[in-house]
Image (cartoon, grey):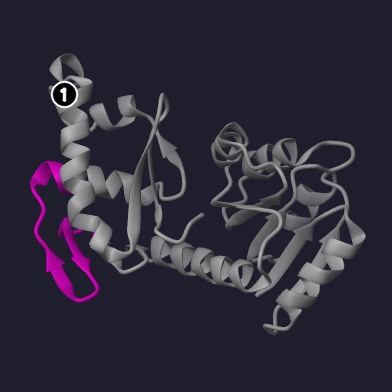
Amino acid sequence: MHILLVEDDEALATSVAGALQAQGWRVDVSARGEPVPRSLAQDAYDLLVLDLGLPGIDGLETLRRVRESGWLQPVLVLTARDSVDDRVAGLEAGADDYMCKPFAPAELVARLRALVRRHENRREGRLALAALRFDPQGMRAAIGEQPLPLSARESTLLQYLMTRAGQIVAREQLMALVPGWAAGTSDNALELQVSRLRAKIEPGGVRLRTVRGLGYLLEAADGD
């Protein structure tokens, strides 16, 4: 893989780059966010690892510019900002994953591998997260090779959530998926539907979290 690492702490950048290069990956390092969109357009990078606390334009603005440029490859935010608000802001700006400092290099490598697998699955029309699989064509789910029976409504919710794994999905977005829901379905009814889906899919190594006041977040169970 070819990775662009954006980190202004020289010692940390050297350490992270070394851990990634030990996997046989090519790593380029930038200390600022301004040149990142142009760099991504010029070279065939597979991943962007992005710090938020950068000099000049910060990581969030860098990420917004990257996504506005049309770059679709995975982005992992690597930062000391660990509040829920910061994580939400990063995901909403276009990050695929969010990892807080300090961190174990082995976990960083594992997360980057998972991001690439997920991206490849999406590109090929498959949806996968941990052991959970979903076939959008047949609207069928499975955990590993074991079929997972779902109702039509549960399948609709799961497909939408899996296409946005790692991102917070607002309650209103889920309500709009099913005709007739938005007008008359209560918060409790939606939470009940989500609770039933959660119980079915979590044995597949995923977690469907309720983020108070914001919506729902589907992620791998080891996502923290």
Q: Quadrant of the N terminus?
A: bottom right
User: Toward which corner of the image does residue 222 lie, by quadrant?
Assistant: bottom left
Q: Is residue 139 magenta?
A: yes
In the rendered image, the vertical position of residue 159 relative to residue 122, given as above or below: above
Q: Position of residue 57 (x, y in %)?
A: 83, 36
User: Toward which corner of the image does residue 193 lie, by quadrant?
Assistant: top left
Q: Position of residue 145 (x, y in %)?
A: 19, 76
Q: Is residue 134 magenta?
A: no
Residue 124 seen anywhere in this rendered image of the structure: yes
Q: Residues within 10 Å of mark 1 (few under 14, many from 20)?
A: some
Residue at the (32%, 28%) spot, across then down:
171
In the rendered image, the vertical position of residue 96 relative to residue 116, given as above or below: above
Residue at the (63%, 36%) spot, across then down:
86
Residue at the (62%, 43%) spot, across then down:
67
Label 1 belongs to which residue? 181
Residue 176 seen anywhere in this rendered image of the structure: no
Which residue type does callout 1 highlight? Trp
Q: Is residue 1 left or right of residue 58?
A: left
Q: Is residue 172 left or right of residue 6?
A: left
- Secondary structure, mark 1, is helix
Q: How many marks?
A: 1
Q: Position of residue 203 (x, y in %)?
A: 24, 63
User: Toward which corner of the image does residue 104 lie, by quadrant?
Assistant: bottom right
Q: Residue furthest top?
A: 183
In the rendered image, the vertical position of residue 121 relative to residue 83, given as above or below: below
Q: Is residue 9 left or right of residue 1?
A: right
Q: Which residues are magenta?
A: 135-155
In the rendered image, the vertical position of residue 223 relative to residue 189, given as above or below: below
In depth, the one of 135 and 212 nearer the eye is: 212
